[in-house]
């Protein structure tokens, strides 16, 4: 009986142990069944939450890059964050995929790999690559030089790019052939490139980079006042308003008297890039002739005659021309070859002095004609000269050598009048002239033309009224002339 009781107790213990082990096994199986792998997402070392599948993060990042690439097709983009996934098994884990992706959207930063363009050390902009920047600069050169020239210089740096152009002689307006040789084309400014990581919005595409390089920059500089300058002209010279000029120069107002040498602050537009071209140009030019003078003792002073006409020569002139953005900044003569020597013009000048003292022998003052009214009383009053008319040539000449003391309009009805002092006590007067060919102070010779017969003043027709005065008193001209 005792044995049976012990056996029964042992049996019960075994049954209890079996039941316990069965329960433990079932619980472990249940636990194992509810274990899951999750992936903790870290952005730059910061934990933002778990996701159930790493492909969710990879797909999200790929989509973000695709969307950015569609917006910035000209830029090399990348994720500028360190993103790590850490795997963990957890019993019945709670995962909020949307919350993790929203957090990613806040923290993930897309950047562009770009090239910083520096001109003379100053930032001009960003390009997607150095090649693109160089391409835009080469295109910029085409504003000032022919494409064929650039290609020729590029193909063989040692060869000159030759282009024949038509030069125009401004004086003759005749086209002449001129050979132009381009020696070099370069950018004046120092251009540098630096690798950079920037916001994609800052990276310029080809079109906008070209605009940026072509736009002039506004810079302040100093201008020295020159003779004749006023505030308005200085402002106009630099495309400024007067108000802008005054704003840049405190202490200067509209009433300020500018001094030569005074310095003013102005602002002007300067190009971002300057295309420098060095050209060798050969053109045909004329050589002006000189004028040689000879003296002729038999020709009166003041009179000239041409002994030989001048003729221009010809020469080939070679220049080196430097241009900046199409504007000539220097033009230096390199060589000259004379093709045809000029022929000088020879002018003979008179040295003979006209006598200013009369000979006392008077010549007839007209070219032919007759006396139509004599000296003496006429119409109840004295007629102090003679009237000459009926000529075929209306030229009036000096009756003797002398000095012109009057030439022009004369009051008292004489009209256009010439009076000559013969410096020997005699004077002669020539009235009613249509025109006068001499001036006061001029020395005239006997028989020299002094005017044209007319009918000015108180005159009844075309004629010459001629008077002779001796020691201030009128005398009968008919007694002195033939």
Image: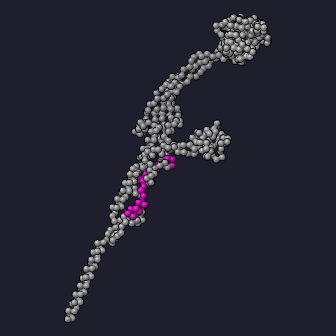
Q: How is the image coloured?
A: one colour
Q: Quadrant of the N terminus?
A: bottom left
Please tell me which residue lies in front, 324 or 85: 85
Q: Is residue 140 visible in this depiction of the protein?
A: yes
Left or right of 434? Residue 328 is left
Please tell me which residue lies in front, 67 or 219: 67
Left or right of 2? Residue 384 is right
Q: Position of residue 168 (x, y in %)?
A: 49, 28
Is residue 35 depicted above or below 256 in this figure?
A: below
Please tell me which residue lies in front, 123 or 306: 123
The part of the image, by quadrant, that contains residue 399 is top right
Residue 152, magenta (yes or no): no
Please tell me which residue lies in front, 457 or 183: 457
Q: Residue furthest bottom?
A: 1
The residue sitting at 50% across, 32% down in the picture is: 319
Q: Quadrant of the C terminus?
A: top right
Q: Position of residue 383 (x, y in %)?
A: 76, 9
The residue sitting at 48% across, 33% down in the picture is: 280
Q: Position of residue 253 (x, y in %)?
A: 65, 44
Is residue 285 depicted above or below 378 in this figure?
A: below
Q: Which residues are magenta?
A: 98-122
The residue sitting at 67% across, 12% down in the picture is: 454
The residue sitting at 72% across, 18% down in the picture is: 441
Residue 120, magenta (yes or no): yes
Q: Is residue 361 visible in this depiction of the protein?
A: no
Q: Tally the numbered discs.
A: 0
Left or right of 450? Residue 120 is left
Q: Position of residue 69 (x, y in %)?
A: 38, 52
């Amino acid at each position: 009986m005792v044995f049976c009781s012990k056996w029964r107790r042992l049996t019960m213990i075994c049954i209890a142990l079996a039941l316990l082990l069965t329960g433990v096994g079932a619980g472990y199986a249940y636990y194992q069944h509810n274990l899951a792998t999750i992936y903790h997402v870290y952005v730059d070392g910061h934990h933002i939450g778990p996701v159930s599948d790493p492909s969710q993060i990879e797909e999200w990042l790929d989509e973000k890059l695709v969307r950015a690439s569609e917006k910035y097709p000209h830029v090399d983009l990348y994720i500028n964050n360190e993103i790590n996934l850490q795997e963990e098994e957890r019993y019945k884990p709670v995962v909020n995929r949307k919350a993790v992706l929203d957090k990613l959207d806040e923290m993930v930063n897309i950047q562009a790999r770009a090239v910083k363009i520096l001109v003379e050390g100053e930032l001009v902009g960003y390009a997607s690559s150095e090649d693109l920047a160089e391409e835009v600069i080469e295109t910029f050169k085409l504003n000032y030089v022919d494409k064929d020239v650039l290609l020729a210089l590029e193909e063989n740096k040692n060869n000159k790019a030759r282009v024949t152009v038509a030069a125009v002689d401004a004086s003759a307006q005749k086209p002449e052939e001129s050979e132009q040789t381009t020696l070099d084309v370069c950018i004046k400014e120092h251009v540098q490139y630096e690798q950079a990581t920037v916001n994609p919005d800052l990276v310029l595409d080809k079109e906008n980079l070209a605009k940026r390089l072509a736009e002039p920059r506004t810079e302040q500089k100093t201008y020295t006042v020159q003779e004749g300058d006023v505030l308005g002209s200085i402002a106009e010279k630099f495309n400024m308003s007067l108000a802008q000029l005054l704003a840049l120069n405190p202490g200067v107002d509209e009433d300020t008297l500018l001094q030569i040498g005074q310095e003013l602050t102005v602002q002007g537009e300067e190009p971002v890039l300057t295309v420098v071209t060095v050209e060798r140009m050969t053109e045909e030019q004329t050589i002006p002739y000189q004028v040689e003078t000879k003296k002729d003792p038999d020709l009166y002073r003041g009179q000239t005659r041409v002994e030989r006409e001048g003729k221009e020569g010809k020469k080939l002139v070679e220049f080196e021309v430097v241009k900046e953005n199409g504007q000539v900044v220097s033009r230096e003569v390199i060589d000259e070859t004379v093709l045809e020597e000029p022929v000088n013009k020879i002018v003979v000048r008179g040295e003979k002095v006209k006598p200013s003292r009369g000979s006392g022998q008077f010549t007839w003052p007209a070219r032919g004609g007759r006396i139509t009214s004599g000296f003496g009383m006429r119409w109840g009053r004295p007629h102090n000269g003679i009237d000459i008319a009926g000529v075929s040539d209306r030229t009036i000449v000096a009756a003797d050598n002398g000095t012109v003391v009057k030439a022009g309009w004369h009051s008292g009805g004489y009209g256009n009048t010439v009076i000559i002092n013969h410096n020997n006590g005699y004077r002669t007067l020539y009235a009613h002239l249509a025109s006068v060919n001499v001036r006061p102070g001029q020395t005239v010779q006997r028989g020299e033309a002094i005017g044209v017969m007319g009918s000015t003043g108180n005159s009844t027709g075309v004629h010459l009224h001629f008077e002779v005065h001796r020691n201030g008193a009128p005398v009968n001209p008919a007694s002195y002339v033939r």
